[in-house]
Each structure stands twice: as C-alpha cells, then as structure tokens.
Amino acid sequence: AGLLAVLATGPVRMALEHLPGLFAQRGGIAATAIMLVSPAIVLFLAVRGIHRSRLHQRELRVRIRDQRAADTLAKLDPLTGLLNRRGLMEDVRLVAAETGGHTKALALMLLDLDHFKTVNDIHGHLTGDELIKRVAQRIREICPAEVLIARMGGDEFAIAMDYQPSFEVVVESVATEI
C-alpha cells in the first residue's frame, strides 16, 4: 500500500492514504490491480470531464445563437425584414435613453396603402406580399440610413427619425418622396 500511495496522485492518493488496511487484506495482487486501474480511471475521468465541458460549451453556444435568432425574429417583420411594431418601440426607447434624459424631438410618419385589401382580393396574397416587399424596399431607398423604418402590420408602415430644425429639409424630402 505504501508503494501504491507514493505512485498514485491526486484523489487516488488521498483515497489510498485513508485506506491503509485495504492492501494488507487483499495482498499484492489487489494492490497491483488497483495500481494499474487507478491511473486508467483517473485518465478516463479527466477525458470524460473535458468531453462534458466541451459538450456544455457547444450547448451554450447553440442556446446563445438560438436566443439571438429568437430576439431578432421578435423584432423584425419576416416578410420585409423591417422592424415590426415591437422592434420600433424598443429602438425608439434606446434612442431616447441615449440622449441621457434630454428631450429629443422625433418625426414620425405613418403610411397606409390605399386599397391594399382589393389587391389581395383580386390578385391574391402572393401578389399582395410582393407589393408589401416592394413598398418596403422603396421606403429603404428613400430614407437616410439612420432612420427607423417599421412595418406596423398589414399595409401600415412607420418611419421615425430624429427631428432637428436643421433636419427639417430631410424630413420634408422623405415625406414628399413617399
């Protein structure tokens, strides 16, 4: 048992030091078997721990990726890729929070496509969806990059932008173009 305790390391050594009578009762064969098996068990447990750690890390990466995807889906309209109502409200709150409590004016334009129901009824929903996508693309082309654009639902869109007196020309230009 003494030789085995000297050769063993870590948890195996601690166990051997607390069980000195074990080897006297079982003789040299048991001591030799434990001496050969114990390092193998320690190696197995170490490899198993590393494998489990890697599995947990992989699972965590997948969960983070899936959560980001869910967050994105919750904020974006799947048809147009624009913000949805919830995404617009969140982004407006973020913009307001960035001002540090200072009042900031916001220009908000609401658009509703006239007679959109008729397009869906006569030409079908695929055509209606295509029209919605084209309108969304046209709004993107017209608006400056820093503007928030959202599809509020159905045939309704919203454009929100910082409103400053010097920005009035841009606001009016976007409104006129649309």
Image: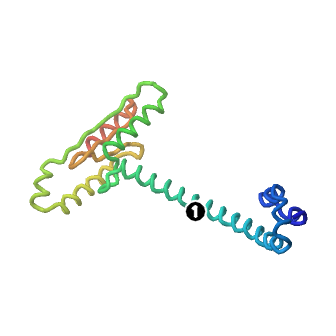
Residue 90, position as x, y percentages in the image: 39, 39
Q: Residues within 10 Å of mark 1 (few under 14, many from 20)?
A: few
Residue 33, position as x, y percentages in the image: 79, 73
Question: Residue at (35%, 50%) from the top-left corner?
Answer: 76
Q: Is residue 121 above or below residue 108?
A: below
Q: Quadrant of residue 108?
A: top left
Residue 72, position as x, y percentages in the image: 40, 51
Residue at image mark 1: 55
Q: Is residue 28 above or below residue 131?
A: below
Query: Of residues 98 and 70, which is closer to you in this image?
Result: 70
Query: Of residues 48 and 105, which is closer to you in this image?
Result: 48
Helix, strand or loop at mark 1? helix
Question: Residue at (14%, 57%) from the top-left corner?
Answer: 120
Q: How many marks?
A: 1
In the displayed image of the protein, which residue is found farthest to the front?
A: 25
Q: Quadrant of residue 156?
A: top left
User: What is the three-letter code of the residue carrying label 1?
Assistant: Leu
Query: Of residues 176 and 162, which is closer to you in this image?
Result: 162
The quadrant of the picture occupied by the N terminus is bottom right
Q: Is residue 4 left or right of residue 58?
A: right
